[in-house]
Image (tube, helix red, strand yellow):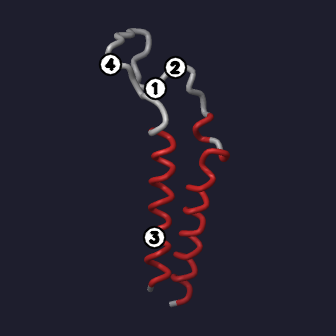
Amino acid sequence: MWGIAIGALLFICGVLFLVREATGQRRLSDPHKLDQGSPTLEPRRQGLRFLGVNRNWPGLGLIALGAILLLSGAFAS
């Protein structure tokens, strides 16, 4: 039972870590600048570097460890 609870907690913490890394490091928009050429909140020249494994390995590790604990708890019962 405790393995499943800890696994779920680790999984959720890993997802929250990935969300924080993707959104927390830079500003998403500039409210003082009215730019008609960019209709989204995504900053210019962002690219896909924020999705790389180098920045997100702790979150991916937490998700993997949580998934292993969840699966082992499910098959142990």
For disc 3, the neighbor class at 10 Å (few under 14, some 14 to 19, many from 20) is: some
Q: How far from the left and from the top, in percent, is residue 17?
A: 49, 52
Q: Amino acid at mark 4?
A: Pro
Numbered tag placed on residue 31 in the rendering: 4
Measure how far apart labels 2 and 1 are at the Cα level.
7 Å
Q: Amino acid at mark 3?
A: Ala
* Badge 3 or badge 2: first in the primary sequence: 3
| Residue 5 drawn above or below residue 39 | below
For disc 2, the neighbor class at 10 Å (few under 14, some 14 to 19, many from 20) is: few
Numbered tag placed on residue 8 in the rendering: 3
Identify the residue shown where x is 43% and y is 77%: 5
State left or right for residue 44 relative to residue 29: right
Observer-side mark, 1 or 4, equals 4
Q: Are marks 2 and 1 in contact (CB under 8 Å)?
A: yes
* Badge 3 or badge 1: first in the primary sequence: 3
Measure how far apart labels 3 and 1 are at the Cα level.
31 Å
Q: Are marks 1 and 4 in contact (CB under 8 Å)?
A: no
Q: Amino acid at mark 1?
A: Glu
Q: Are marks 4 and 3 in contact (CB under 8 Å)?
A: no
Q: Which residue is mark 1?
A: 42
Q: How far from the left and from the top, in percent, is residue 64?
A: 60, 64
The total of numbered circles placed on residues is 4
| Residue 34 drawn above or below residue 70 | above
Identify the residue shown where x is 39% and y is 18%: 39
Q: The N terminus lies in which quarter of the figure?
A: bottom left
Measure how far apart labels 4 and 3 are at the Cα level.
38 Å
Q: Which residue is mark 2?
A: 44
Farthest residue in the front direction?
25
Secondary element at tag 2: loop
Q: How far from the left and from the top, in percent, is residue 35?
A: 39, 10
The one of 43 and 24 positioned closer to us in this rendering: 24
State left or right for residue 41 relative to residue 11: left
